[in-house]
Image (cartoon, grey):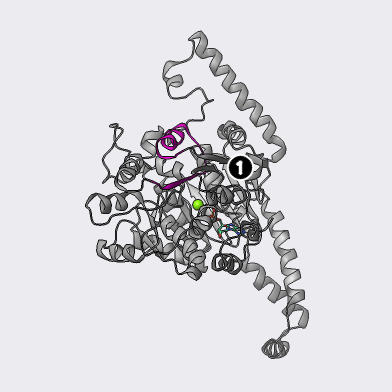
């Protein structure tokens, strides 16, 4: 099947051709005809599977450009608002359909001006609610899209979204909900805002991006930095994103990697909007090769050519894992996801495998001499392929007066080797063949603990600090409500204690 089978209007088909899309992705195949037929839909597919075009194309196709805002797309973050509106602009420009992007932190007046001229508005919930509530804009869109609905909920936007749906004056609207996961709260929200929706659920095997290979490496807690540097040296990523759980960790790791000579930039929730944009632009253009980021900051980030995603620490839950690794393997390119785990966290790997429905393969971290020898092979290939330049001939001629030709060659090779010296200790982490044994040990420890708990013989203080998932809850783990707390300016809806500073995302 091709996009032509949808019989979209000529200017839209032309934009699809210009974008270089040939075959629709599974979610596009299912969702586009349903949307064209006028149905509300609730669609679930993993990140990186082309959801934007799945709602964007049919929606644009049904618009008539009458000068009003016909389509409203609500997204969780400013970056996503910009990305989605870029993609919508790309598909709509040949039809003269304008897009306005609406998010917090910038001038109201400019945004209101743009909205007045737009057919499509892409907005984050907070600013949109502000504009609607104050009566500064009125919207009666025919199409409303909730993109990344699960993330919006995670970020605590449920109230805003409910308010927005009360404020927009669309009786006959078509509502489309897209989400990578479908927790019960999402289903509840769907019941409220959708009319007789059709469900599009791309099954795990279809939606888990098969272009992403997933590996994990077992290391001691103190070996994480060394392991990461060794793996970057070995894998030689074009661009990579390294995920940490906490902002503090992001900053520390970024300065460590910078000191190792890598071109690094950070992305976390405490950054000003402008700083974030500068960082993302630098990453896209290649001035930096490595992004160190927290989950929240990197949500939805769509950068081409991210060859590797590293999980410096395991994410807090399986959903975050899916979102993290979805930053690679985008737009039909292959990618690799690499997770560092300590022996204590091995059970979590099993849990994620089960939740996500994929298998992660364990590997041994290559030793220093292994990486060295693979680099040498690369160097030999590189030298053999190098064109000899005039200047090089001059240089060798000059040197030859003093030094024997073989010695010159040795010196040059040494010079090049020095540049790619592999640092760190010879061996890092556990061998892949030992992991099964470690895993069994972790399971046995857990069984043992459960038994002691049942008989009430365990030390209370010890038991209280662990949960029944086998001691994998660590000191820096915390309850979900706290974790999802946004910036401190937002009142704490759960009424619990504010998150501790160290855990800021
Ligand atoms: P999602 O919202 O599901 O995470 P996106 O809509 O951001 O995914 O799409 C991911 C990337 O894949 C984007 O760069 C997009 O341009 C590209 N893409 C989407 N659909 C196709 C397609 N049918 N063929 C090729 N690339 C596509
Ligand atoms: Mg998306």
Q: Which residues are magenta?
A: 172-195
Residue depicted at x 63% and y 43%: 217
Residue depicted at x 29% and y 37%: 498
Q: Which image quarter: residue 107? A: bottom left
Give how far across and how far down residue 492 sits, in percent.
28, 37
Residue depicted at x 35% and y 56%: 271
Q: Quadrant of the N terminus?
A: bottom right
Ligand 1 image position (quadrant): bottom right
Residue nearest the viewer, comparing 256 with 100 = 100
Residue depicted at x 63% and y 26%: 441
Regarding residue 367, the answer to whether it shows in the image is yes
Q: Which residue is mark 1?
A: 202
Give how far across and how far down residue 348 sits, in percent.
56, 33
- Left/right placement of residue 64 relative to residue 388 reads left
Q: Secondary structure at mark 1?
A: loop
Q: Is residue 92 above or below residue 367?
A: below
Residue 183 forms part of the magenta stretch: yes
Considering every residue shown, the one lying at the far top of the view is 455
Q: Which image quarter: residue 201? A: top right
Residue nearest the viewer, comparing 343 with 65 = 65
């Amino acid at each position: 099947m091709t996009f032509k089978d949808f019989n979209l209007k000529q200017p839209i088909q032309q934009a699809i051709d210009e974008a270089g899309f040939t075959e629709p992705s599974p979610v596009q195949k299912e969702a586009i005809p349903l949307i064209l037929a006028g149905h509300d839909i609730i669609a679930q597919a993993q990140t990186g599977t082309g959801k934007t075009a799945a709602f964007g194309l049919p929606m644009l196709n049904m618009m008539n450009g009458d000068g009003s805002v016909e389509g409203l797309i609500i997204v969780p973050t400013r970056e996503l608002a910009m990305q989605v509106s870029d993609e919508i602009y790309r598909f709509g420009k040949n039809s003269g359909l304008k897009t306005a992007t609406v998010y917090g932190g910038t001038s109201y007046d400019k945004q209101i001006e743009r909205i007045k001229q737009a057919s499509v508005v892409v907005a984050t919930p907070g600013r949109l609610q502000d504009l609607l509530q104050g009566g500064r804009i009125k919207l009666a869109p025919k199409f409303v899209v909730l993109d990344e609905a699960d993330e919006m909920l995670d970020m605590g936007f449920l109230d805003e979204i409910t308010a927005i749906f009360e404020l927009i004056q669309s009786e006959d609207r078509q509502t489309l909900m897209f989400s990578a996961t479908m927790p019960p709260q999402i289903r509840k929200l769907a019941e409220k805002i959708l009319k007789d929706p059709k469900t599009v659920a791309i099954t795990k095997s279809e939606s888990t991006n098969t272009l992403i290979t997933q590996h994990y490496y077992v290391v001691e807690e103190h070996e994480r930095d060394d392991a990461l540097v060794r793996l970057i040296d070995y894998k030689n990523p074009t661009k990579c994103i390294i995920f940490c759980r906490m902002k503090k960790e992001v900053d520390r790791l970024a300065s460590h990697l910078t000191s190792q000579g890598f071109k690094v930039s950070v992305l976390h929730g405490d950054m000003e909007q402008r700083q974030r944009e500068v960082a993302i632009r630098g990453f896209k253009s290649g001035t930096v090769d490595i992004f160190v980021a927290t989950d929240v900051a990197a949500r939805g980030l769509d950068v081409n050519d991210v060859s590797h995603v590293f999980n410096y620490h395991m994410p807090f839950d399986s959903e975050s894992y899916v979102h993290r690794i979805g930053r690679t393997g985008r737009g039909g390119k292959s990618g690799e996801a690499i997770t560092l785990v300590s022996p204590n966290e091995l059970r979590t790997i099993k849990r994620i495998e089960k939740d996500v429905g994929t298998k992660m393969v364990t590997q041994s971290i290559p030793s220093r001499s292994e990486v060295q020898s693979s680099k040498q092979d690369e160097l030999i290939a590189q030298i053999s392929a190098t064109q000899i330049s005039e200047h090089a001939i001059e240089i060798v001629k000059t040197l030859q007066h003093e030094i024997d030709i073989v010695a010159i060659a040795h010196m040059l090779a040494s010079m090049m080797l020095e540049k790619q010296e592999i640092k760190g200790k010879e061996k890092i982490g556990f061998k892949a063949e030992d992991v099964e044994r470690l895993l069994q040990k972790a399971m046995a420890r857990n069984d043992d603990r459960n038994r002691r708990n049942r008989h009430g013989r365990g030390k209370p203080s010890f038991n209280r600090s662990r949960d029944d998932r086998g001691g994998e809850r660590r000191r820096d783990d915390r309850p979900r409500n706290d974790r999802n707390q946004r910036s401190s300016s937002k009142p704490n809806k759960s009424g619990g204690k504010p998150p501790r500073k160290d855990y800021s995302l």
